[in-house]
Amino acid sequence: MAEGTVRVSGLNLRGSLTTGAAVKVLRRSSRVEILGEETWLRVRTRDGLTGYVFGDFIERDPPPDVAVEAQTPSKKLALERYHHERFVGNPVTADVDFFPLLDRIAGFAQTCKLFVHVTSSTRDPGGQVSGAIVEPAKRSTDLRWSGDFSTPDVVHVDDGLNLRNPQLWEAKLASRA
């Protein structure tokens, strides 16, 4: 199912096409799921309301061009250098289990004609991070884009393995000798 972002302020969400009464006014940057398409789009809001909006006012998300299969990461940390033309700046060193997710980020960047500017990547536990915007995470891995952090951290990317499977995360960390 496609998703998109409202590009204007005050977009009416209507109960039916063209002349339907507005059931809600959507703010700029509101996220919607696109359920159908003509000139008008049938959408669902995050709070579950469905209705219609004029399609020109929704910016569509690029389709994912790299499917990431669910797989169980190995218990051993295997750090390697990751290369892709869309990653610029400092080198990316990551566990090879995260490479499919890095490929997916690179695919989005390619589709959107963007570059991912890397300032740092994997570091030694307890290692210092210079120029950090927020206090560096003490228990983090690599690929969760701005998750539910207690302090906003718009540049942090990690996969949340330390939260989903702390035992596996500890095993990986312990294998880094």
Image (spheres, rainbow, N blue to C red):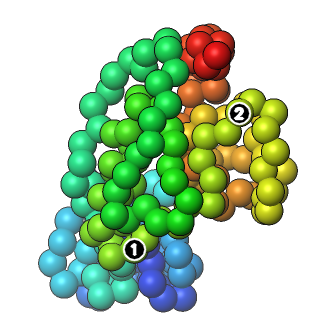
Q: Where in the figure is residue 96, as x and y percent of width and height? A: 41, 31
Q: Residue 124 carries which label?
A: 2
Quadrant of the snapshot with the C terminus: top right
Q: Do the residues labelled 1 and 2 touch (CB within 8 Å)?
A: no
From the image, state whether disc 1 or disc 2 is nearer to you: 2
Q: Where in the figure is residue 144, as x and y percent of width and height? A: 55, 45
Q: Is mark 1 on a helix, strand or loop?
A: loop
Q: Which of 35 and 122 is in front in this view?
A: 122
Q: Is residue 160 visible?
A: yes
The 10 Å Cα crowd at callout 2, few under 14, some 14 to 19, many 20 or more, is few
Q: Where in the figure is residue 170, as x and y percent of width and height? A: 65, 15
Q: Nearer the viewer, residue 159 or 40?
A: 159
Occupied quadrant, residue 35: bottom left
Q: What residue type is labelled 1?
A: Leu
Q: Which of 22 and 138 is in front in this view?
A: 138
Label 1 sits on residue: 114
Q: Which mark is residue 35?
A: none
Is 9 placed left or right of 113 in the picture? right
Q: Residue furthest left?
A: 38
Q: Please tell me whether residue 174 is drawn above or below residue 153 in the rendered image.
A: above
Residue under the image location 26 percent in, 74 percent down: 41
Residue under the image location 33 percent in, 39 percent down: 100
Q: Which amino acid does label 2 sit on?
A: Asp
Occupied quadrant, residue 161: top right
Is 62 placed left or right of 124 in the picture? left
